[in-house]
Image (spheres, rainbow, N blue to C red):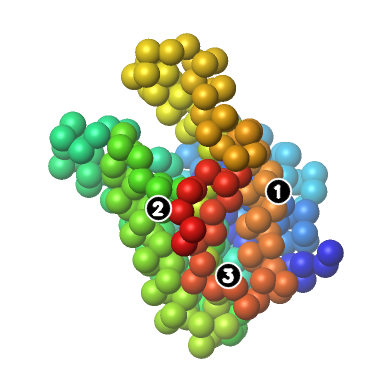
Amino acid sequence: MNLGLKNRVAMIAAASKGIGKACAAALAAEGCKVSICARNLAELDQALAEISMVGEVMAVPADVSNPADLAHWHIRTLERFSHVDILVTNTGGPPVARFMALTDEQWNSGVESTLMNVVRMSRMVIPGMQDRKWGRLIHLTSIVAKQPQDELTISSTLRAGLSGLTKTMANQLGPDNITVNAVLMGYCLTDRLTHLAEIRHQEQGISLEEYYQKAAADIPLRRFGQPKEIGDTVAYLASERASFITGVSLPVDGGAIRATM
């Protein structure tokens, strides 16, 4: 299937590994010119080498929670590719704790790392998209936006907020032919899943292997997702084929969310 993405320019945040890298690889394979960023220089160089095998890519060291780093990444991308057609926002998970264990500092850190960088990245690229009357904004979030989890208090709060932001942005940017969607990721085989598993198996008093088996059994498809499956979803949402899809918070979770809406 031709997704109509050849020579489109895509920025993918935090793309040195895991789901970010999978999204960058999927877009590069469809013919996009790809700009990626990440904090870890060694991992960023490795991702650059791997993605270069399937398409054109540039890499800029940047911490997505740092406004100056984001601005620098955007400027470097414009210098290389002249404009941005697609933005994939991707953030690390905020602190893991139940409500009464969280401090103001942790809440502030979560807002900066999970919400405000999405706001800042979007503000950078929207004016150019409006000028060209074409754009795709895709926010990578989590199923906790629809199915909150007790120990993910900050994430559950802010991811739900991102779904609200996605809808309001879609309403406001639709007249400029810019679509805005969110991908609500389920349990995927990433470092974040490993981190949560380490916490949860101890809380539940079971072995790590037992926790993984139990968690997979709770998913209707009886398995965890692969980063590539998220990357393929993002590539479709960025495509011409998805031009009438906007304002959606799409679960990609193997059926883990139990709600009907």
Q: Nearer the viewer, mark 3 or mark 2?
A: 2
Kindly indicate the quadrant of the structure image that contains residue 16: top right
Q: Which mark is residue 145?
A: 2
Q: Residue at x 37, y 13 (%)?
A: 205
Amino acid type of the residue that numbered disc 2 sits on in the rendered structure: Ala
Q: Residue at x 71, y 74 (%)?
A: 240
Q: CA distance from mark 1 to mark 2?
A: 26 Å
Label located before the other in sequence (1 or 2): 1
Q: Tell me where residue 160 appears, x and y as whole percent.
A: 36, 56
Amino acid type of the residue that numbered disc 1 sits on in the rendered structure: Ala
Residue designated by label 1: 25
Q: Nearer the viewer, mark 1 or mark 2?
A: 2
* Number of numbered discs on residues: 3
Residue at the right extreme, as displayed: 1
Instruction: Give 32 or 18, whichever is nearer the viewer.
Output: 18
Label located before the other in sequence (3 or 1): 1
Q: Is residue 198 above or below residue 101?
A: above
Q: CA distance from mark 3 to mark 2?
A: 21 Å
Label located before the other in sequence (3 or 2): 3
Mark 2 surroundings within 10 Å by alpha-carbon count, few (fewer than 14), some (14 through 19), many (20 or more): many
Q: Tell me where residue 134 appears, x and y as whole percent.
A: 60, 79
Mark 3 surroundings within 10 Å by alpha-carbon count, few (fewer than 14), some (14 through 19), many (20 or more): many
Residue designated by label 3: 136
Assign a secondary structure to mark 1.
Answer: helix
